Every structure is written in structure tokens, then in C-alpha cells.
Amino acid sequence: MNVMFAGGSAYYPEIHGGLQSSTHHLAEQLLAAGHQPSILASLYGDGVFGLVARVKLKMLRQGAVMDHFQGYPAVRAWFPWEAVPYAVSRLKPDVAVVQCHHSVAIGKALEALGVPVVVYFRNVEFDELDGDPSELKSALYIANSRFTAAAYEKRFGVKSVIIPPTIDPERYRTPTSRQFVTFVNPHVEKGFERAVEIAERCPEIPFLFVESWKLDAENRARVEQAIAHLKNVTLEGRTNDMKTVYGRTRILLAPSKWEEAWGRVASEAHCSGIPVLGSRRGGLPEAIGKGGIVLDYDAPLEEWTSTLRRLWSDEGHYQEMSAAALRYSKRREMSPAHQFSTFFGVLERAAFRMAAAA
């Protein structure tokens, strides 16, 4: 089966995030099972990769370019929804998985060309959809959490199969020196201000702040200024090998103030038996589950610091939570084989549904 992942977001190597990681893992599983994945993505045009793509666009005088950077074909365009005919003619998908930005516009363009559509809801930013997903005539739907599924059913009346973000445990499982409380992605939405407050109140505990979303010069200066007086906080740039981060982490701190659809870093940390202290926002409590402790984002700061201190200093309590985190990482819901089987089953149903309606 030829499976095209389509959306208005950029893709590797132009951007690295949870969407790209999960999509790439699914693509690898498709390849391993003898299928052909492909990508339709937005082109950002930054860096050397972007420069080459821009030159190709100009020389070829077409609205999209194709590459095999990840080992499978990717069509990139300034406006992916306008490049659907180009992508379909070259990639010949049997089914398309539409995700995130401009999902509805892209889905409608695909349906008009007779391509079965599966919409994978990965956040609850409804304005990104560019329309109402229930208007897609033959689409099936996947959501990355019970929280996400409930939000889309309430707003649009669509029911989704729930498949949490797929991860390859071997990419994250590692022995750890347990030397830091780690906070990934120092942005306001991810709870940066609360993380700074916690670090201020716990000077005896070393913290590691790790960039994930790229910080521009202005935001990096803001982050550096906010932590400059904290001798117990180390700031590091983003990495493509999260084992180097989890290999030094004792506790993952995730005090997000955003309505997270899931909480990928929690699932990654659990693979190494790292417990998570996080906020009760969106689908994040589902991701943390029995593998950590969940508090209200607006809970008193003392509640956050006392909970963290106990997890840091009470070895018996820590070992209990660490073992729970590792067990939670092995639950059926997060099994790559189970996730892929469920995912492929939805693809097959979408293809059959379109064929039956023809």
C-alpha cells in the first residue's frame, strides 16, 4: 500500500518535533512491512536544504519539489494544499493521512482526486484545520488521546480511533546517571515561568533546561536572562539524540500551561524509568498516568516544590515511581506493534470505504 502523510507543516530536516518524529516512526514501520510511505509537506526554505529546494522551484518553474532525504519520497511546496494534484500524480497514494495545518483543505483536494483520507488529530488547535473535518465525505479519524478525541467529537461530531503518538522505545531507552531534573522546551506555553519558579525555590537541586522548538535570538536572550541568576540551572541547545538528555535525567518536569493533546516527552522518559512531574492540562495526564505525579498548573508553588523534593530525595519513593514509569511505558496502548496494527487497520477501512462509495 502507498501511504502519503500530508499536512501544512514542514518535515525533516527543516523542522524537528513530535509530529515529525511520530510520522517518521510510522513511515519506518510501513517500510518494514513492505509498504511505501511518502510525504506532502510545507516548505520553509531555510538553511542549506531550503536554499536547494528554492533553487529547484525556480529552475523547474513548478509549485513543488521532491526529494528522498529520509529514505522515502517527500513533496514540498509553499502551499501544500495547492500541490495536491502534483503530489498525487507522482506519489500515487492508495490512502492519505492528513495531519495538522490545513487538514480540511488538503483532505478535500485529495477526495476530489479519489484518494481515501484518514485525518489524524494531533492537537486541539481548531483554527489550524482550515475548515470543518466533518465535511470530508468519506474520511475516517484518528486522535492521539482520549482528550483530543473528546474535543473533536464535541466540536465537530466526529468519532476517532485513539492511537497515542508512536515512538520507538529503543531510541529513548538508556541507563541514566540521574543527575538532573530536566525541563524540555523552555517556552511560556510549556510552563517555562513555573519551571523557573520551581528551580528558584529548590537551589539544592540541579536542573537541565533543554531547547526543543528552536529559540530565535530574542527568545533565547529572554530565557538566558530569566535563568541568569540561577546557579542550579543549565541550558542546552536542542539535540536529535534524546538519549543524551534522558541519560542524565532523574525526574522529568512538565508543568505545561498549554492544553497538550498528549505529552510525548513523558512517554519518551518513561522508556528509561524516569518519572514525570507534570500539570493537569489537556491530554498530558493521560501520557503521565501511573508513571508520575500530576498537579494542577495553578497549584501553590509549595505543592510543586515539596512534591519534587520528595521525589528527588526519598530514594524509596523514587524507586517505586521509577519502576511504575517503566511499567507504564510497556502498556499495550504504547506497544509499537499494537499501534501500527490499529493504524493500518484504519487505513484499510478508509480505502475500502472509498472503493465501496465509488
Image: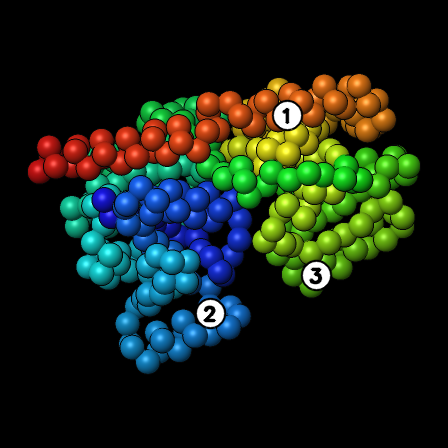
- Comparing marks 2 and 3, which lies closer to the viewer? 2
Question: Dot 1, how many residues are within 10 Å of its Cα: few (below 14), some (14-19), or many (20+)?
Answer: many
Mark 1 — residue? 325
Mark 3 — residue? 218
Question: Dot 3, how many residues are within 10 Å of its Cα: few (below 14), some (14-19), or many (20+)?
Answer: few
What mark, if any, has residue 50 been given in the picture?
2
Q: Cα distance, mark 2 to mark 3?
A: 23 Å
* Dot 3 or dot 1, earlier in sequence: 3
- Comparing marks 2 and 1, which lies closer to the viewer? 1
* Dot 2 or dot 3, earlier in sequence: 2
- Does residue 357 sit above or below 68 in this rendering? above
What's the residue type where badge 1 is placed?
Answer: Ala
Looking at the image, do the residues carrying marks 2 and 1 touch, with CB atoms under 8 Å apart?
A: no
Q: Quadrant of the N terminus?
A: top left
Q: Is residue 25 left or right of residue 133?
A: right
Q: Cα distance, mark 3 to mark 1?
A: 36 Å
Which residue occupies 21% across, 41% down? 116
Where residue 41 sits in the image (x, y, percent)? Answer: 38, 56
What mark, if any, has residue 336 been given in the picture?
none
What's the residue type where badge 2 is placed?
Answer: Gly
